[in-house]
Image (cartoon, helix red, strand yellow):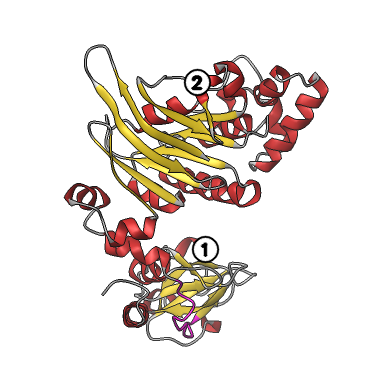
């Protein structure tokens, strides 16, 4: 556990970056610090590994005041991931990851073996180890940064806006990778972001900071969305917080209906009869997109290039009401594509059935009325 007890950071010019912060970070969980620029979230993070020292109060790591620890020794037990990875440009990927094991006394062979294991853990192929950072994409560099932070198997991992410099698609993939890693490793993670959607998606608990370095609210994502502490938190979380809250409601009870499909590469005449839209699927019955019945009537063979993007998918294995509703709203057919755990088409889902499920959840008290 990491405990902030009346922690303050005040600079010589009078600027207060953090103001009397009281907060406990649970062990084995992801705690997200979020807030606008200049609110003290990064300063709070860096005080944990003594990159910055507080001017008042104390920070305890497993009950011990961090000021009693030698800073370099303290940092070896705390992984640290920053924006744009911060890799050594003159070292190969595998040597970047092996840096910390070498510092802690491992042989070069053992350090490289550990590095290779970690590259696999973060989803990078073995051949990536021979490349230099400049030869990697931004997302790949961030994965290497995470692997390096995990190299000494630290119980604590600090992440300072690690995914903010990559595009939305890569960012979503990195977020999913982090959640997967956490499910396997159970680290104590403190994650800094300015993006409330990222905070809600990743955090077991979320600390919202206001400008001036004061803690505005510390709660679970669902509590934060349902009961913001004040107008500032309400404004920061956003007017669409009710929609975000659907992400915490299981959609298992939402009915999935039949949907017309057509296999790519087959004759258009073989497609299921429909007066609206059909889902085009591959050989494994995985969705590729939609075709309108009008477009279908003009072609002899169904080809992949003719399909219209199908919007987001709803996974029946673990999907939420938010993902179910989004699949229906983002579909050109007004019908969301539901897939099973293997990504195969399971049927279609309508927005009104999702809203009916939400109404039931309200009646049973799962969400506030």
Q: Which mark is residue 139?
A: none
Query: CA gap, disc 1 to disc 2?
Result: 61 Å
Q: Position of residue 206 (x, y in %)?
A: 39, 48
Residue furthest toward the top? 12
In the foreground, 20 or 205:
20
Query: Residue 62, relative to residue 169: is it above or below?
Result: above
Residue 363 seen anywhere in this rendered image of the structure: yes
Task: Name the residue that disc number 2 marks.
Answer: 67
Query: Residue 150, relative to residue 363: is it above or below?
Result: above
Q: Which mark is residue 304?
A: 1
Disc 2, SS: helix
Residue furthest toward the left? 231
Q: Would you call the spot at circle 2 few (<14 residues within 10 Å), some (14-19), or many (20 or more)?
A: some
Quarter of the image for the C terminus: give it. bottom left
- 259 in the magenta segment: yes
The image quarter in which residue 263 lies: bottom right
Which circle's residue, 1 or 2, is located before the other in the chain?
A: 2
Residue 308 seen anywhere in this rendered image of the structure: no
Q: Would you call the spot at circle 1 few (<14 residues within 10 Å), some (14-19), or many (20 or more)?
A: some
Q: Position of residue 252 (x, y in %)?
A: 49, 77
Q: Position of residue 274 (x, y in %)?
A: 43, 86
Q: Report the side of 38 relative to 177 (left or right).
A: left
In the foreground, 98 or 73:
73
- 166 in the magenta segment: no
- In the image, the segment drawn in magenta is 250-260
Disc 1, SS: helix
Q: Residue at x 64, y 17 (%)?
A: 91
The image quarter in which residue 306 lies: bottom left
């Amino acid at each position: 556990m990491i405990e902030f007890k009346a922690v303050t950071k005040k600079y010589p010019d009078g600027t207060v970056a953090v103001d009397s912060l009281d907060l406990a970070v649970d062990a084995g969980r992801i705690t997200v610090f979020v807030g606008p620029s200049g609110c003290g979230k990064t300063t709070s993070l860096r005080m944990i590994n003594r990159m910055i020292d507080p001017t008042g109060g104390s920070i305890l790591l497993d009950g011990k005041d961090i000021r009693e620890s030698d800073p370099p020794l303290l940092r070896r037990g705390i992984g640290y991931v920053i924006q744009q990875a911060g890799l050594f440009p003159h070292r190969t990927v595998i040597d970047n990851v092996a840096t910390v094991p070498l510092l802690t006394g491992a042989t070069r062979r053992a350090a490289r073996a550990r590095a290779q294991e970690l590259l696999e853990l973060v989803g990078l192929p073995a051949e990536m180890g021979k490349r230099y950072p400049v030869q990697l994409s931004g997302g790949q560099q961030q994965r290497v940064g995470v692997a390096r932070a995990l190299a000494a198997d630290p119980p604590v991992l600090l992440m300072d806006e690690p995914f903010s410099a990559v595009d939305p698609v890569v960012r979503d993939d990195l977020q999913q990778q982090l959640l997967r890693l956490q499910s396997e490793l159970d680290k104590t993670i403190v994650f800094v972001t300015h993006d409330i959607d990222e905070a809600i998606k990743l955090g077991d608990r979320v600390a919202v900071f206001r400008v001036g370095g004061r803690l505005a609210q510390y709660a679970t994502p669902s509590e934060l969305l349902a009961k913001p502490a004040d107008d500032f938190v309400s404004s920061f979380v956003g007017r669409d917080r009710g929609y975000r809250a659907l992400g915490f409601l299981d959609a298992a009870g939402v009915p999935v209906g039949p949907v017309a499909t057509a296999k790519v590469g087959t004759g258009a005449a073989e497609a299921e009869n429909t007066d609206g839209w059909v889902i085009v699927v591959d050989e494994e019955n995985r969705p590729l997109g939609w075709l309108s019945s009008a477009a279908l009537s003009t072609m002899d063979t169904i080809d992949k290039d003719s399909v219209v993007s199908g919007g987001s998918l709803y996974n029946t294995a673990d999907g939420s009401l938010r993902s179910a509703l989004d699949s229906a709203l983002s579909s050109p057919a007004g019908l969301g594509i539901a897939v099973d755990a293997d990504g195969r088409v399971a049927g279609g889902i309508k927005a009104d059935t999702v809203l009916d499920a939400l109404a039931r959840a309200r009646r049973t008290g799962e969400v506030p009325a």
